[in-house]
Image (cartoon, grey):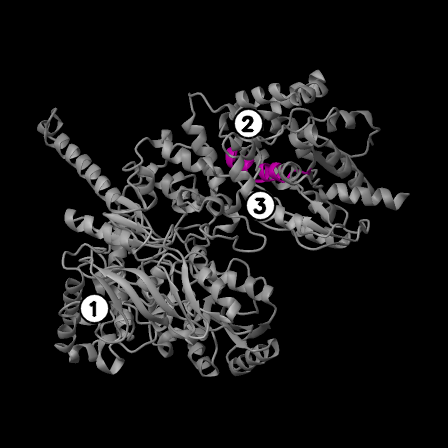
Amino acid sequence: MSDLDAAPGGPARHRRDQERADQDGLARALRAAVRGEVDLSATARALHTMDASNYRRVPAAVVAPRDADDVAGVLAVCRERQVPVVARGAGTSIAGQATGVGVVLDFTRHMNRVTSLDPAARTAVVQPGVVLDDLRAAAAPHGLTFGPDPSTHSRCTLGGMIGNNSCGAHSVAWGTTADNVTALSVLDGTGTPRRLARGWDGAPDGLRALVEGDLALLRTGYPDLPRRISGYALDALLPEHGTDLARAFCGSEGTLGLLTEAVVRLVDAPRARALAVLGYPDESAAAEAAAGLLPHGPLTVEGMAADLVRGADGLPGGGAWLFVETGGDTPAEARARARTIVRAAAPDTVDALVVDDPAGQRALWRVREDASGTATRMRDGTEAWPGWEDCAVPPERLGAYLRDFRGLLAGHGLRGTPYGHFGDGCIHVRIDFDLIGREGIARFRRFSEDLAELVVAHGGSLSGEHGDGQARAELLPKMYGPGLVGLFGRAKDLWDPAGLLNPGMLVRPDPLDANLRFAPLPREPVDVVFGYPHDDGDFSAAVRRCVGVAKCRTAATASPSGVMCPSFRVTGEEEHSTRGRAHLLHEMLAGEIVTDGWRSTEVRDALDLCLSCKGCRSDCPVGVDMATYKAEFLHHHYEGRRRPAAHYTMGRLPRWLRAVAVTRTAPLVNALARVRPLAAAGKRLGGIAPERAVPDIAPRTLRQWWRRRPRSRAVPDVVLWPDTFTDHLSPVVGRAAVAVLEDAGLTVALPPDGVCCGITYVSTGQLDRARAVLRATLERMAPLLDAGTPLVVLEPSCAAALRTDLTELLGDDPRAHRIAASVRTFAQAVEELAPHWQPPHVGRPVVGQTHCHQHAVLGDAAERRLRARAGLTGDLSGGCCGLAGNFGFERGHYEVSKACAEEQLLPSVAAADGDAVVLADGFSCRTQLDQLAGVRGRHLAEVLAEGIARRER
């Protein structure tokens, strides 16, 4: 900066003042023009800088239009001020087309309905923000569905699908989105409303002349293959193709007009489905076999190789697989067709299986659908990125193309894991580009140019599903030549003369190596407390794990036992999704929009409703761990500052409860908590929600009970961890666990006084205290560690803290890893240490919820097996109870906490048989059930201990 710029009243200050005035003027004009929300806050802009691509742009404003009139109002304001406009659905685009520097239109908030559905005509009228799964749910009662189904079907929107001409796994049966659209209502760049269908009605002036003036080029310039998505589909306007304006508009990525309504075609949904999974020696063999299966009429022919699969549970033998789905009117018919596929493929396969039960099929499809996230990390932890995510070639050339593609990767010193729609010749891949260093970015460009030439040499399309956006549009001349690309530009100018609709995409694109999302991030590691062992200790790398596929943005959990992301499912707000929080942390590190670093109120407010459930740690395909990031942020945010009252009360709960135990004042404290004025005052001072009742403290702790009972002098088989909640608030659980473990023939011991897992300190970001507590625990546990005694932890959150937080906070101490390795859940200990013990036969159904930390960190397979051996039938629900330790008790969180419980836990309990056992291994879950439903949940140990007592009578 020059001295003149730095001087008061200099050009720099003038520019800043002018930018602020322009922003204020834009805000006033937009709010006057629309009824929907207009948001120019740092939070809103930061949440919309990125999609699922490698690119980042900072928008000026975010508008959630209520209707087509609002969209027209935004266009009018933006035309007057020469501000770009970009349409956005779920923001899962992989080529950068859902990012923009002007006004972002978020259609998901209001324009998200299925307006009508006509079963007889097999059509539906939808708004652009409707989620695909919502349309399919509306069509399902009529035996219908929408054919195209991207792997993001639980959150992608119809507007985005039309903008990208999306396809999905079933395109071999039902085609692309363009094949399933009959009419579109759009506003072009001038704000003119247009109705697009077959024929020239609704076309902008000059478009017909443009097409008729270059018929020869349009007839010869496009490759013939099922997945040609790149460029504008101007060939759909040829007379021999029926002059289909709606089809031509599909795949235009918001550069020609803004969609306000669509009429889509529905197809018959098979009444039954079966899945043939075919194992091949390698990827090339699978690719070469795919085209030969198409004459048998499959619904899908999906392919993936072993280097993408994290564990091959449920898959047949082989180094690569084809997932071939068949349909029928009956399960027998679908199964027979799948077996026909297996027989037809037999000469080339090494193994195969047919799966016809829906649960088994869903489990296998999750392996495939999670690939877009799983592929972002190589097996050695190296990051991998999109950019060449979905090239397509003629299916019969796929095997040869893949061999050449693998060779090209090796020639550039890159790695990737191809998978995708083998039946359509479309390959997805994430590649370990270095998109941060100068040489890495240069290699990204060289590889992109070489791969474009390879795809064209095989008669393919640069995009076979996700569109060109910024990632590939620069290279379209290699595919189409300058003449056809020039025609694209002339068509764009007819629809959008001012060039304000999604500029930089598809036509006159920005360079493929500009606007990269990582450019503003710090180059040196940020000083942090957690070790981030899976990210080489780099907090920026941990935040970069979020690639924007938005599995967290779903209205329901992705699987019956899933957890992520409970706060988003309650509020529906992007800032309360795992992705939204990760993007805000990204912008905090970037420092351009979120400028206060660790002191950021924007990040703090977004994290406030994070329940620290850890669901994202397991359910996110790339393992984002927002609970850890939240703890890290809170540590820095409040460092040297006064904390919220709840951090001093609930965050330091172990200290207060130990004081009560030492002074034996539990009865007095309980009595005072029942005096309403005193309780209200205490909750107000302690930051506790007024709606919450304070749980009773046990008059006698687990340790006090333990000291009074006769103990064996034998070397213990297990050490029972007396966590704070079990010890002080529900010692009955600990006593029950002792009874069961001893009935199983195990000798039990308790560790020395003063041990603690630190979970309450971690969840409130008091990481210095957490580390001090954990160091003291390591010292006190040293003798038991030397003996290698298993550690049985009854409270899932404490077990998860000892398994993960301990090593991530004190990873340089080998004793931390030894404790983590010794941790067992109650069921794991019984199964491992007393394999021949026969539990009592309870013989009752169960209901309840798997603890979210158990789901995310520990797994519940041993618990399910132990329940089955005891005759406890049925499955527990997923989701989160909503109390989540201190979260549900904190002032301001009650409504969200309650709504989380009402999603799965409370309905499952209310609908249960009267004889059902309500299981809840976590103290939070039991407390939530008691306070919201008046139901007593029990730990599995309690249920088994009661069975033992009955057996001995």
**Image marks 2 and 1: residues in contact by CB distance under 8 Å:** no
Q: Is mark 3 on a helix, strand or loop?
A: helix
Q: Name the residue under label 3.
A: 902
User: Which labelled disc corresponds to residue 478?
Assistant: 1
Q: Distance between the residues labelled 2 and 1?
A: 63 Å
Judge by depth and name the residue closer to the eye, 838 or 120.
120
- Amino acid type of disc 2? Ile
Which span is picked out in magenta? Answer: 792-811
Local packing at callout 2 (Cα closer than 10 Å; few below 14, some 14-19, many 20+) is many
Query: Residue 65 location, x and y as percent?
Result: 31, 50
Image quadrant where residue 58 sits: top left
Q: Mark 2 points at which residue?
A: 688
| Residue 946 shown left or right of residue 459 in the figure | right
In this rendering, the answer to whether 491 lies above or below 806 is below
Q: What element carries label 2?
A: loop
Residue at 13% across, 70% down: 206
